[in-house]
Amino acid sequence: MALSNRCPRQAWPHSGHGDGMHKFMRGMAPLSVAAVIAVAAGCGQRDVVVASGSPTSPGARTEGMSPQPTITAPRARRSAYSFELQKSDWSDQDASSYNAQTELADGRRVAMFYATDKGLMEQHFDPTDGGWTRPVLLYRTKEHPCQGIELEAKAGTVAAVANWGTYCFDGEPPQESVAIVGASTLEKWDTHLTESFDGWEKFSISSDGDVVMFVNEAWKKSLRWSRSKGFS
């Protein structure tokens, strides 16, 4: 198709948004982008609008134009709850107590287990997605587990006690006793370590889930956690 050297009779506003521009672009639809630019340039038009139906493919170079970037669609994000429940890999005589699990009122579940040469691991389950999160390390140690894991939930708050000690089987107290608390989304956990201590005998969660108290009556020790201050 030959192009006329004459400009269209009806000029369009300099901004490129007038009716004349629309009529001109409709009339030139069969032309290539380069041809449209050439005509526009010949008429003294500074702003050239390229329609979305342009035959120019992404990344191709047309004279007078910058190459358009190639757009790659992002990968679908893997659900955070797409993992299997894992268990402790310890195999000694008390290994059956090295796993613990509790359920929240909304159907979510929390599991903790001792992992060899790592420490205490945590996963939580969402009933909507039907899977567990990837195991995360809450407390790192290479010591041998001492006693089981105490784990409870109330009012959206989850609390636990875990202990480690090389000579626990000989009657020695744990070398490391850790109190753990998580709340709400369970994406953040607070931990508190007490060394060379018999461990926390019990703990209680308040009815609103705002406070957790850890107690060892023999040692006359207590530890307080709150949603507003954490451990104190």
Image (spheres, rainbow, N blue to C red):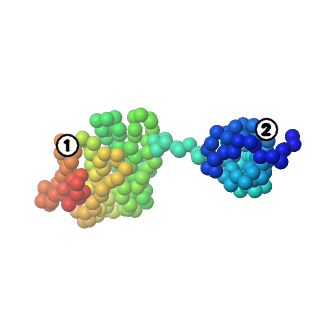
Q: Quadrant of residue 162?
A: bottom left
Residue farthest right in this picture: 2
- N-term mark: 1 or 2: 2
Q: Which quarter of the image is occupied by the C terminus?
A: bottom left
Look at 39% across and 44% down and name the residue there: 124
Let me know if residue 171 appears in the view: no
Viewer-side residue, 207 vs 31: 31
Foreground of the two, 140 or 190: 190
Secondary element type, mark 2:
loop
Residue 190, numbered circle: none
Closer to the camera: disc 1 or disc 2? 2
Q: Position of residue 166 (x, y in %)?
A: 33, 62
* Circle number at residue 30: 2
Which of the 4 image quadrants contains residue 155?
A: top left
Local packing at callout 2 (Cα closer than 10 Å; few below 14, some 14-19, many 20+) is: few
Residue 77 in the image, given as x and y percentages of width and height:
53, 44
Q: On the rendered image, what quadrant is the N terminus found in?
A: top right
Q: Residue 3: image x %, image y %?
A: 84, 44
- The residue identified by callout 1 is 208
Residue 152 horizontal/vertical position (percent): 26, 44
Quarter of the image for residue 115 reads bottom left
